[in-house]
Image: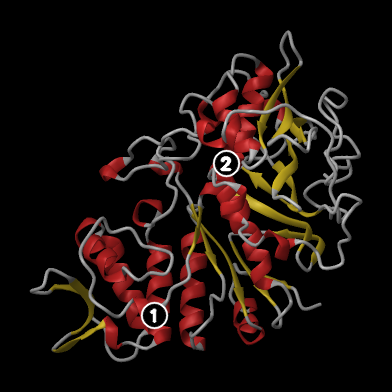
Amino acid sequence: MDLTGGSTLARTSDTPSSDVVPSSVRSSSAHSSADGSSADGSSAVAPASAARASGPSGPSGLRGSGSRASVPEARGPVAAEGRVAAADRVAPRAARPAVTELRLSAFAGHRSAVHALGPVTLFAGPSGSGKSTTLRAYEALARLGAGDTLDEVFPDAADCVPERARPDAQGRRGFRIGCTVDGPEGPVHLDVAVQAEPRLRIVGERLTGRDGRTLLATALRDPGRPAVQAEWHTAGATPVTRAPLPDDLLGTALLPLRVAGKTRGQLEVLAAAEQVVVGLRSAFACDPRPERMRAPVPPGEGRLRRGCGNLAEVLHRTHTDCPRRHHRLAAVAGAGCSGPVTGLGVQELPEGTVRAVLERGGRPATPLGRLGDGELRYLALALTLLTGPGVLEMDRIAEVPDAMQSLTLLADGLDRGLDGRQLGELLRLATDIAADGHVRVAGTVGERSAGEARRTPGVTVVDLGG
């Protein structure tokens, strides 16, 4: 996919076009880079806000996203009609959608980069090697899949453009990222081309099925209108459906709201789109900030925030709602915190707030506010691994059954503030939990921690230093 808008499904109903995504590009190959963008025509659409739908309430009163595209319950992964026969599937399919490959075709300092992602994947390398940028691209795709607008996801989009990218005659430059999401429909590939200058917009998007069929393609046709021309596979009386889509939202996330699901082709498109959306929306970016975790907090809903400043509030909830997981967290705390630890308790203070404490057996309990930065980060990351979407402040998908819910922890600087013992315990916990398929981890570590990660069975280390 380049930034020129490229060709459409009208010319390539079954095979990707070379000027959008080369047919040779698959999950095992690198994409060529692109530096500029151009556009050539489309019609206007309704405002982006009109295309979003409210998410229904989930269990325990936890709500789905109120302003993001919902995944219809009766389609995609739960629809049997119109699916490819089981005999046509040559490999077993993953039970839960998961991002298994990240592509940075032209993004900041990355060009033609393709990274396979395992259940626990850590990006290592010296400072400046692009570790944080790689994880940022993953989070950006996750947020786009959840329905966030382009300007929300890329407030500083110019920094994502490769430094050597030269603008075209109209002064346009951009970047390209993509991923592969594996699941019941097999590997589905998503590639997105973004124009960053002079105005932020999506200028091209392609969704490709496991057999190489182009299921969705979008192209910018009229630079003066806030829309791209979209075409998706129908396989009915009309082989291709065309319609304008907003240029500030991911078209794949909008398909469940636009496709009726009446033909075999439409069901195929829906299943692929929903697999990608579910896989991307499972991500939770966690960046524990010890300075925010020390003070008592008011009790509340008990959903852990990105910075983990409400750690005591969440422990107050898990202490009663998830006793088994809370007990396991206490055991993990004993392995990574100094001194004896017999449990994790929560104290309700007279002013109506709560604080968490480490129980020390016969000794006085230690408030978490007295712990070191590394101990607090260790506890917060362990809590994230031991809980799930319902206990994290993330875009939980209410339409997906709890048994099919998954979590991908994104942890930039996973080893920050941790000593070797804490990092080793955390990695062993991550691989142990990831073994059942509910939890995956993608993070970054420094060069010193990479050795410990490589020695831990089940951890994939991607070295960006070479």
Q: Is residue 211 above or below residue 371?
A: above
Instruction: Tell me what residue is drawn at x 45 percent, y 48 percent.
Output: 395
Q: Quadrant of the N terminus?
A: top right
Residue 184: in sight, yes or no?
Answer: no
- Mark 1 vs mark 2, foreground winner is 1
User: Residue flagged by tag 1: what amino acid is it?
Assistant: Pro
**Would you say 324 lies left or right of 124 here?**
left
Residue located 75% across and 74% down the image:
464
Q: Which mark is residue 98?
A: none
Residue designated by label 2: 277
First reached walking from the N terminus: tag 1 or tag 2:
2
Residue 42 vs 162, above or below: the answer is above
Q: Residue at x 30, y 80 (%)?
A: 294
Q: Position of residue 99 (x, y in %)?
A: 62, 51
Q: Position of residue 432 (x, y in %)?
A: 48, 65
Q: Element under label 2?
A: helix
Q: Which residue is mark 1?
A: 290
Residue 314 against residue 422 in the figure, above or below: above
Mark 2 neighbour density, 10 Å: few (under 14) some (14–19) many (20 or more): many
Across and down, in percent, residue 421 comes to 47, 86
- Residue 185 position, x and y percent, is 64, 35
Q: Quadrant of residue 214?
A: top right
How many residues crowd around disc 1 within 10 Å: few (fewer than 14), some, or many (20 or more)?
many
Q: Amino acid at mark 2?
A: Val
Name the residue at the top extreme: 237
In this view, the residue in front, 450 or 199, is 199
Q: CA distance from mark 1 to mark 2?
A: 32 Å
Tag 1, which secondary structure? helix
Contact? badges 1 and 2 (CB < 8 Å) = no
